[in-house]
Amino acid sequence: METRVIFGHLVEEIAREAGEMLLAKRPARPEVLATKSSPTDVVTALDRACEELIRSRIKAVRPDDAILGEEGGEAGEGRVRWIVDPIDGTVNFLYGLPEWAVSIAVEVDGEVVAGAVNVVPRGEVFTAVKGGGAWLAGERLRCNTGVPLERALVATGFGYESGRRRVQAEILGHVLPRVRDIRRGGAASSDLCSVAAGRVDGYYERGLNPWDYAAGGLIAAEAGARVGGLSGRPNSPGFTLCAASGLFEELHDLLLPLDPERDA
Ligand code: LIP
């Protein structure tokens, strides 16, 4: 069996197990253990416990691989790197909003080849293997195509720092009159899967981390969407834009002059 297919099975299996643990252990109101980039960027005990579970499962089957995780950072080095977000949408998890996910991707020589996003509250596990399509519950996913900007339902998100949020609100003020409507889900990995599933037509956000977009980006790309940054740059923490060709370019040309990669 091809290695990337094996990675595909592993990310799905581990993401499912991690989701079951979170569902079983989530208290009515999770406790905030600490804050990170700002007072509203929280980490709960289950963020850490979930990442530890995922890391131990990876180590058990792939002891020599590198791992990058939101809570534990980078560990190890090598051609194969796992990219882990134990709970994407932590604020939703904290408040009990049904929009948070376990996101796991595998990268080989810098290229993401397998990814799984388990949107636990909805019981939906999105998966993709590079070249093998994007899937949900045995159904192959295809993003929406041929949607003009003025009819596009667009998802976006906002950072944890007020300066960045002020700029993002300013950008939104320009985007909103030009599209059908905006959706703010609160979990980038799930937003990218929503593009893949045709539940939104496009998505953009500034300031994501690799663990927010690695798996979801592959799933959206395998569903036919373009995933990238601005001015031909690849997707990065600088900027993430995702939509089918046509709408991708229209959104790009609307956003670029607004200089959305600034934080003040
Ligand atoms: C979240 C992202 C979301 C963004 C939030 C936050 P977290 O990640 O998935 O798109 O808008 O500000 O960064 O912090 O829940 O892992």
Image: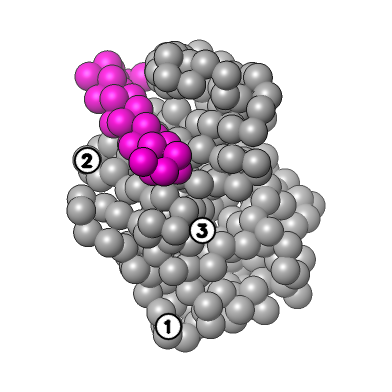
Q: Which residues are magenta?
A: 1-30
The answer to whether the beta carbon of the residue marked 3 is less than 8 Å from any atom of ligand 1 is: yes
Left or right, 120 with reference to 102:
left
Q: Which residue is mark 1?
A: 147
- Measured in 3D between alpha carbons, the distance from the residue under mark 2 to the one under mark 3, in whole angstroms, is 23 Å
- Measured in 3D between alpha carbons, the distance from the residue under mark 1 to the one under mark 2, in whole angstroms, is 29 Å
Frontmost of labels 1 and 3 is 1
Where residue 7 sits, quadrant-wise, is top left
Q: Amino acid at mark 3?
A: Thr
Of residues 185 and 252, the one nearer the viewer is 252
What residue is rendered at 33% in x and 48% in y? 126
Q: Earlier in the sequence, mark 1 or mark 2?
A: 2
As drawn, 165 above or below 31: below
What residue is rendered at 48% in x and 21% in y? 62
Q: Amino acid at mark 2?
A: Gly
Q: Earlier in the sequence, mark 2 or mark 3?
A: 2
Number of marks drawn? 3
Determine if residue 263 is in view.
Answer: yes
Secondary structure of the residue carrying numbered label 1: loop
In percent of width and height, residue 167 lies at 70, 57
Q: Which residue is mark 2?
A: 123
In percent of width and height, residue 22 lies at 30, 23
Of residues 247 and 162, the one nearer the viewer is 247
As drawn, 179 above or below 19: below
